[in-house]
Image: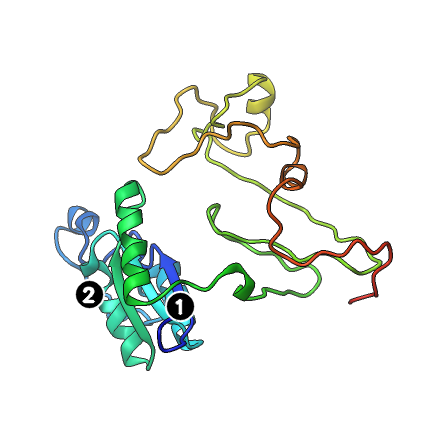
Amino acid sequence: MSPDRQPVAVVVGATSKWQADGRNTRLAHGKDLDDRHLPVGVRWGVGGAIAQKFAKEGFLTVLTTRKAANAAALEQAITSQGGRAMTVELDLVSDASIAKAFATIRERAGDPDEIAKAVPLTGRAGSMSFHHVRLLHGSAQNVSRLPRALLLYEYAATDAWPLMGVKDLAEFDARLVAGPPTLEPRVTPVPVRIPLPPARNQGSIYENQTAARRFFSFTEEAEAPSRT
């Protein structure tokens, strides 16, 4: 919450990797491109669209990007739409940059809203959600008398090997959806944490979380009131 009581939203990677005047654009086309024909809502990719959505909902929107110049036009677009935004440089491969960025955010904008103020995301039966692997998310307890079913699909590139290795190479390769198998894992400069020590209740993601801190209210009632 900002000092003037405005909720704060921090959008990590507020601009897409593609930039009309970016280095890769110049390498591919030999010049900057004119993106003025693109709708303002999609001009900066998913990150830019999310940032504009938060700003329209009344949030002070913090745009993080490696170079502040990359988000200058996005910040201007949000301001012209009546929103409030600020840009903070953030390099996710640098612990020092992450610490400095969030120190700057807290100093200039206040603390980002906490879990208790998370925005509910609901959908009709059959809905799907797509989110980044690093997005903090969770579900409140199911207190209805009906089971809550979950179908989880997890896709990864062929060369994105599990950090802890592969126990059965043949079984691993058999699960390929497309492309040839490889023994050359891709290595990129992104923040990584080895999943050790193992969880106290090591197993599925739900078993792993049984010993974790609980962020949502919980009732031990055997038959809670039906909620549909």
Tell me residue 147's x, y (percent).
80, 53
Residue at (68% x, 37% y) in the render: 207
Q: In this view, does 60 lie above or below 193?
A: below
| Apparent side of residue 77 relative to residue 147 in the rendered image (left or right) | left
SS class, disc 2: loop
Q: What residue type is labelled 1?
A: Val
Extreme residue toward the left, this view: 31
The quarter of the image holding the N terminus is bottom left
View extreme (bottom): residue:
82
The numbered disc on residue 8 is 1
Q: In which quarter of the image is residue 19?
A: bottom left
- Residue 41 lies in quadrant: bottom left
Residue 119 in view here: yes
Residue 201 against residue 32 in the figure, above or below: above
Q: Quick one: 22 or 72, which is closer to the camera?
A: 72
Q: Mark 2 points at which residue?
A: 34
